[in-house]
């Protein structure tokens, strides 16, 4: 396709290096991105119950090794000119390993954070998990912006695009070291001491589809809203700005950077606010505000560079209340006995079907319809689902996550009284 015409964004540089020159490499690269998300439910099915059996800490250590090594390997794949069809095959294989490991890593990290945090500060503490995630976006965009302004097109296509992937090696080692230095969560250790983990988690899949189906469905709807916005706004935006709006490469990387920094600064504030007013109001406000603002802001993004920066920043700040409260909201929807599995499976199934495929779906629909507002419509629909799901969400601010009942229910409140009485 002539449309590629040497688009200089990391996605297009990867496509130019690892796919044939006469193919639609950008779309195939985005398909590879989507492929990893289709594998995530398998990872969730594997790592989730395992995390409820052997502990959060061990599973997190294993998943981070897989994630770091597979990310590093992408940067080491030889070009299509060197090894032919093996280049895209190795890219897809690496993305599959990434998806499999991510199936346990994110749900485990959220569960780990929630179970360690004080009950009355779970929102504030949990927001720092997303500060770390968003810092990764900012770091990646900053490195990409630096590279495209320092290196020429040939250097970017041959080796420049690989450099951000090499960062995974030291970051993976640091993350593994920090996680291995910490004990497993007190809540899990309490359950383990009662020898309640192994026998009761055997029927985890049956329990999730029967006893906790309502929780899974609510989580599913919230994750659709969360990750359609996340991957459309944060991951796909640079590609959208350049391939659809013909924005210059450096500008396409600059636009999200300002918005991501603004979100990064406000996440702890929104996390702390959720400890005061609750998670449910935060989600209802964020989804409703995005429904109202997304189309006007996407129209503003299409005007010029200043409009794009403002439009992205507004959408990012309206989305931040969701992002800041993930760790406080999702793990609190399940009892300890199935918490890791419930979050990992529910989160990853919804993400794989709606979030991880967002880039490829948006790119395909824009190409088929010629409508530049497709991403806005996609986000709007997802947020409507989020509003319905948030309406049925049980409020758990300030409540303990101990026990065998769903937090926030009358049964859980009664169980908490008994646990407190027992010391």
Image (spheres, rainbow, N blue to C red):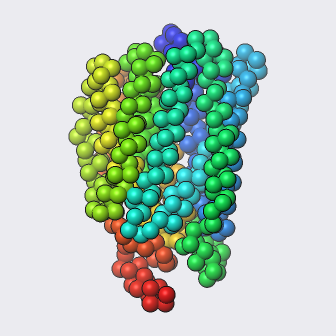
In the image, residue 188 lies at what x, y percent? 58, 72
Residue 273 visible in the displayed image? yes
Q: Please tell me which residue is depicted at 30% across the width and 43% down the height of the picture.
A: 318
In the image, residue 84 lies at what x, y percent? 74, 20
In the image, residue 274 lies at what x, y percent? 33, 59
Is residue 172 shown left or right of residue 350? Answer: right
Is residue 121 shown left or right of residue 80? Answer: left
Q: How many marks?
A: 0
- List the single residue furthest toward the right: 83
Q: Nearer the viewer, residue 71 or 333?
A: 71
Is residue 102 shown left or right of residue 382? Answer: right
Vertical order, 422 against 97 (above or below):
below
In the image, residue 350 lies at what x, y percent? 47, 50
Residue 89 visible in the displayed image? no
- List the single residue furthest toward the bottom: 421
Q: Which of the 4 image quadrants contains residue 391?
A: bottom left
Q: Please tell me which residue is depicted at 49% across the width and 71% down the height of the picture.
A: 335
Is residue 157 shown left or right of residue 398? Answer: right
Q: Please tell me which residue is depicted at 58% across the width and 20% down the height of the picture.
A: 13
Q: Which of the 4 image quadrants contains residue 85?
A: top right
Q: Which of the 4 image quadrants contains residue 406?
A: bottom left
Q: Please tell me which residue is depicted at 56% across the width and 42% down the height of the picture.
A: 37
């Amino acid at each position: 396709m002539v449309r590629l015409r040497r688009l200089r964004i990391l996605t297009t540089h990867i496509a130019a290096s690892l796919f044939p020159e006469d193919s639609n490499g950008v779309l195939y690269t985005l398909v590879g991105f989507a492929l990893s998300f289709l594998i995530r439910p398998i990872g969730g099915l594997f790592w989730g119950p395992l995390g409820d059996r052997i502990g959060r800490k061990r599973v997190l250590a294993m998943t981070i090794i897989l994630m770091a090594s597979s990310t590093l390997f992408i940067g080491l794949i030889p070009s299509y000119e060197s090894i032919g069809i093996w280049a895209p095959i190795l890219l897809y294989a690496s993305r599959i390993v990434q998806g499999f490991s991510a199936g346990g890593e994110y749900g485990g990290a959220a569960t780990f954070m929630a179970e360690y945090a004080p009950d009355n500060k779970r929102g504030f503490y949990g927001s720092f998990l997303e500060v770390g995630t968003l810092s990764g976006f900012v770091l990646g965009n900053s490195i990409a912006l630096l590279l495209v302004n320092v290196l020429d097109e040939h250097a970017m296509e041959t080796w420049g695009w690989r450099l951000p992937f090499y960062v995974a090696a030291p970051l993976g080692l640091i993350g593994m070291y920090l996680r291995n230095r910490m004990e497993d969560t007190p809540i899990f250790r309490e359950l383990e001491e009662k020898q309640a983990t192994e026998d009761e988690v055997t029927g985890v899949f049956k329990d999730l589809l029967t006893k906790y189906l309502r929780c899974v469905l609510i989580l599913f709807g919230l994750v659709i809203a969360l990750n359609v916005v996340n991957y459309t706004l944060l991951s796909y935006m640079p590609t959208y700005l350049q391939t659809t709006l013909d924005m210059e490469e450096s500008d396409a990387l600059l636009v999200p950077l300002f918005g991501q920094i603004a979100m990064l600064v406000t996440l702890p504030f929104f996390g702390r606010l959720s400890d005061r007013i609750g998670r449910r109001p935060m989600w209802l406000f964020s989804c409703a505000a995005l429904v109202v603002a997304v189309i006007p802001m996407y129209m503003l993004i299409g005007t010029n560079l200043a409009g794009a920066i403002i439009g992205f920043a507004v959408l990012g700040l309206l989305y931040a209340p969701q992002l800041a409260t993930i760790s406080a909201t999702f793990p609190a929807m399940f009892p300890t006995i199935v918490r890791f599995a419930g979050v990992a499976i529910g989160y990853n199934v919804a993400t794989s079907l709606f979030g991880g495929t967002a880039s490829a779906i948006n790119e395909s629909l824009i190409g088929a319809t010629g409508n530049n507002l497709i991403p806005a419509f996609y986000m709007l629909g997802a947020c409507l689902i989020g509003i319905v799901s948030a309406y049925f969400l049980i409020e758990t601010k300030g409540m303990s996550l101990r026990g065998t009942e769903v937090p926030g229910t009358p049964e859980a409140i009664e169980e908490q009284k008994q646990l407190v009485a027992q010391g």
